[in-house]
Image (spheres, helix red, strand yellow):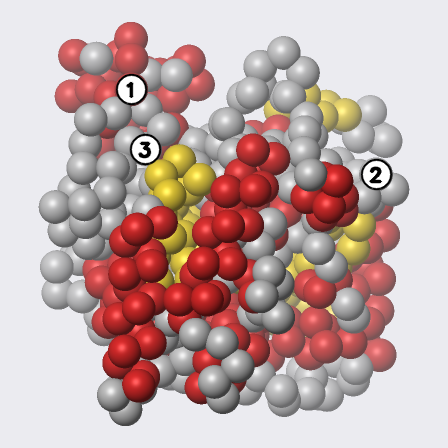
């Protein structure tokens, strides 16, 4: 089995570890070897801590040998988005401003993963201060050329490429979901407050979340079991009870009402994405779910209302904008300076629009259990002459920057405060991943996992490996 262990899911590897089929050190060694072989394709890792990871794996093996079973994540491998603190590892945030910063302590989520016996492999690429959707220099393992999404682009690429079983990402407007979708893995934006953000660099004071990325729905739920729960050090952390997020995995979807929005969520979209998501809806119907059209008349306001996040980000980056603006990348500097120009009345109007968007979801959830939409309007695109500004054109003649192509369908969900699970549901004609997001009411991640797992079991999308990566690795 040596040489293939890195592709095992957490659920599979946890069983093999306890059956004595391999050790945590062997699992970690295989994964590190694979990262060293393939990171030249993905450029996902910005800091690989091989020595530290092997020491953690040896400790996991020793604990198991001594009869100390810490749970399913003991000895399992993960990476961390480079805006989330891992004590002793650099946290550069993909910015010259933070190039010399190394935190002395773990973020809360990393501390919880350590307590569960998980093995931290290192830090993966993010867009600068989480403000973007391309995460340079990372590249998509499906073609080796296209962007990975953002801002947790390194997390999406690493998980898809077998460079760690799971990854910790962060999502404000889209930043777990579009990297999961563009790289063909699972990921969840959790309910705001469900997972503590302590020890992460913030983008928004009202919408930031930290969430899991994994290759299967089950692994995504298992990871959330470890990370979720109140943290008194985080003023946005919720004290809502934390259920077992795997409790309804394996339950069928017969009788569940699945909402499919009319209009906005299927406007200005690539044909392969529209067809794949609608085919996924048909699959859910075939599994016994009732499909219901739902109206989202205010969703189109979400892009304009996103101005309030620009204002919040500008407030958080204010000292840097005044003193070190020249060290920002051009896109982040533009956002920071724009946010500084917004007026209080602009912020208030944006919040009023946010309320209208949230009302759409509240009304829809009075009639349905979940809502299914595309995750992105376009598949991953290669940079043309700049790794940030990439234009996308649609069959209907509409054109936009990838910032909106990858966030237009996710931002309304963030504004509503809902959880959303991304699950792969197809490949484009060019062989790039297509995905859907399964949106549930606040604090009802369990239902999203139930629906996502039912779909996953009826298809084979989550079992597919990135074609370019595998071909290149075999040729090496």
Image coords of residue 80 (percent x, y): 37, 50
User: Which class describes the residues within 10 Å of circle 1: few (<14), some (14-19), or many (20+)?
Assistant: some
How crowded pointer 3 is (Cα within 10 Å; few <14, some 14-19, many 20+) is rated as: many
70 lies left or right of 144: left
From this view, report whether residue 332 is shown above or below residue 278.
above
**CA distance separating discs 1 and 3:** 8 Å
Q: How many marks?
A: 3
- Residue that appears at 50% across and 27% down: 136
Q: Residue at 12% x, 46% y: name it.
A: 104
Write down the residue under mark 3. 93
Tell me the element at label 3: loop
Q: Position of residue 269 (x, y in %)?
A: 76, 39
CA gap, disc 3 to disc 2? 32 Å
**Residue pushed farthest top?**
326
* Residue shown at 17% from the left, 57% from the top: 234
Residue at which label 2 appears: 430
Q: Badge 1 is on which residue?
A: 96
Q: CA distance from mark 2 to mark 1?
A: 35 Å
Nearest to the observer: residue 405 or residue 77: 77
In the picture, the quarter occupied by the N terminus is bottom right
Q: Residue 130 falls in which quadrant of the image?
A: top left
Residue 453 in percent (x, y) is at: 64, 76
Tell me the SS state at disc 1: helix
Quadrant, the C terminus: top right
């Amino acid at each position: 089995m040596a040489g293939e262990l890195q592709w095992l899911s957490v659920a599979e590897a946890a069983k093999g570890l306890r059956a004595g089929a391999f050790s945590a050190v062997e699992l970690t060694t295989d994964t590190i070897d694979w990262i060293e072989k393939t990171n030249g394709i993905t450029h996902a890792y910005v800091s690989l801590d091989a020595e530290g990871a092997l020491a953690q794996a040896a400790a996991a093996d020793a604990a198991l040998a001594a009869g100390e079973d810490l749970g399913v994540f003991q000895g399992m491998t993960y990476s961390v988005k480079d805006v989330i603190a891992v004590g002793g590892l650099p946290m550069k945030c993909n910015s010259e401003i933070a190039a010399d910063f190394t935190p002395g302590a773990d973020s809360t989520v990393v501390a919880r993963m350590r307590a569960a016996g998980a093995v931290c492999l290192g830090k993966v690429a993010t867009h600068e201060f989480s403000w973007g959707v391309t995460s340079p220099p990372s590249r998509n393992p499906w073609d080796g050329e296209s962007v990975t999404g953002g801002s947790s682009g390194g997390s999406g690429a690493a998980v898809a490429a077998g460079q760690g079983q799971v990854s910790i990402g962060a999502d404000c407007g889209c930043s777990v979901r579009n990297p999961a979708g563009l790289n063909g893995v699972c990921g969840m934006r959790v309910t705001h407050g469900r997972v503590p953000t302590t020890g992460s660099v913030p983008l928004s004071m009202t919408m930031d979340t930290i969430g899991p990325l994994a290759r299967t729905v089950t692994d995504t739920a298992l990871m959330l079991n470890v990370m979720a729960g109140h943290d008194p050090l985080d003023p946005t952390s919720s004290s809502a009870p934390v259920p077992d997020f795997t409790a309804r995995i394996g339950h069928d979807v017969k009788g569940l009402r699945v909402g499919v929005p009319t209009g906005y969520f299927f406007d200005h979209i690539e044909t392969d994405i529209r067809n794949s998501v609608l085919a996924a809806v048909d699959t859910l119907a075939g599994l016994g779910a009732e499909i219901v059209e739902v109206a989202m008349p205010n969703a189109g306001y979400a892009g304009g209302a996103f101005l309030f996040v620009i204002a919040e980000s500008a407030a958080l980056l204010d000292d840097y904008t005044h003193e070190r603006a020249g060290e920002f990348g051009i896109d982040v500097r533009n956002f920071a300076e724009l946010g500084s120009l917004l007026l209080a009345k602009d912020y208030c109007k944006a919040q009023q629009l946010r309320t209208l968007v949230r009302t759409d979801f509240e009304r829809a959830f009075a009639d349905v259990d979940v809502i299914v939409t595309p995750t992105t309007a376009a598949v991953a695109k290669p940079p043309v002459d700049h790794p940030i500004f990439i234009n996308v054109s649609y069959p209907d003649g509409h054109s936009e920057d990838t910032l909106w192509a990858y966030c237009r369908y996710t931002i309304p969900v963030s504004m509503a405060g809902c959880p959303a699970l991304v699950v792969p549901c197809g490949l484009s004609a060019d062989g790039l991943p297509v995905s859907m997001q399964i949106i549930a009411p606040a604090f009802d991640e369990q239902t999203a996992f139930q629906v996502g797992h039912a779909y996953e079991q009826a298809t084979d999308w989550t079992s597919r490996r990135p074609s370019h990566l595998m071909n290149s690795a075999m040729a090496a």
